[in-house]
Amino acid sequence: MDPKVNGQLQKDWGGFIALYLFLGGVGGGAYTIAAINGFLGKSMALSTTVGLWIGFPALFIGSIILLADLGNPGKFFLAGLKPGTSWIARGTGIISLFMIFSFLHLVIHQFTEASKTSAGMNILAIAGIVFAIMTIAYTGLLLGASKGIPFWHSGIVPVVFVISGLVTGHFLIMIGMVIFNEGVTTTSQLSIMAAEAAALVIVEVMAIIFFLQAAYKQPDSRESAERILRKGIFVIGYVILGLGVPLVLMLILYFAMTESGLGAVLAVTFIGALLGLIGGLLLRLAILVCGALPTLNIAGFQFRRIARPKDKMPGIGLMPPQ
């Protein structure tokens, strides 16, 4: 039996689920950044407006993608049943409340004359931030509840997803600010956003290192940790292009481009933010495709569950000597 045959890897969750997890993180992250910047007043008004326009639509589109992947979207209403025992049911409630809060915040902010700093708006923003963070965390908890995949079954996964959601949401806001820029006044806002982005990326780097170290120390998840470190989409796509390059560009934008022209600032911002956004999607995809079933150790022999092409259920096979 060839150990390089990926029969022991999970095949059920792939690109569509990665896109849903990504959009959930982006939507929650963009709303959180927008709501926080909203407390700063007019100095960050553009980032607030762009972020509010991202939050609700991103999660709405992600939910549609998830329903399409279920195979029978007509039974979506069953997802909210049994919240006491089902993470899917709990997540349905959390996501629904976040979508309500984010939609109300967007409508009031954009289409009414209500004071942006009133007590009611502050309460709405705080409630939205709480459920936005819970929504991002849920995308990680959903994986953590999958006990059959040790690589996912970790309390660190939701933390990684929350940080990554804030980073990707932040980067998408920056892209929106580039597209809808208000001239030279946007430069100072982008400089502040660049400093925030650099700090968030550094935190994400530390979280990823901690996550992979913890996974490698556990025998059941070590194989997945080794696999992900060999994946080009993770090492090149996520670590180098999705974290390293954006971090460098954000630092350049903050420290070395304060006197640069608007065109140069917008170009550097767009490239760095786009790479960071793509990196967030590749992170989720890599974590999904590297999820492996656990290896069993019985009487000194190692066994792993292997699904043959025509088998509905995986069987157990003896691993060859290393």
Image (cartoon, rainbow, N blue to C red):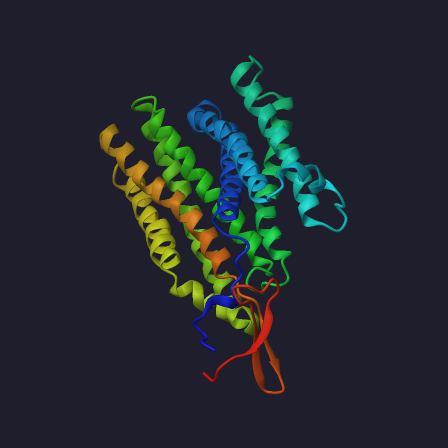
Check the image and report above or below for 292 versus 265.
Answer: below
Check the image and report above or below for 34 versus 240.
Answer: above
Is residue 116 visible in the rendered image? The answer is: no
Check the image and report above or below for 272 versus 211.
Answer: above
* The one of 6 and 261 positioned closer to us in this rendering: 6
Spot occupied by residue 150 in the image (x, y as percentages of width and height): 58, 65
Q: Quadrant of the C terminus?
A: bottom left
Residue at x 57% of width, y 85% of height: 301
Spot occupied by residue 266 in the image (x, y as percentages of width and height): 29, 32
Residue at x 46% of width, y 39% of height: 169
* The one of 1 and 199 positioned closer to us in this rendering: 1
- Left or right? Give the position of 164 relative to 149: left
Give the quarter of the image for residue 111: top right
Q: Residue furthest top?
A: 113
Give the quarter of the image for residue 191: top left
Residue at x 43% of width, y 29% of height: 47
- Left or right? Give the position of 73 relative to 234: right
* The one of 115 and 230 positioned closer to us in this rendering: 230
Spot occupied by residue 321 in the image (x, y as percentages of width and height): 47, 85
Give the quarter of the image for residue 155: bottom right
Q: Residue furthest front?
A: 310
- Left or right? Give the position of 1 relative to 187: right
Is residue 283 visible in the rendered image? The answer is: yes
Spot occupied by residue 221 in the image (x, y as percentages of width and height): 54, 68
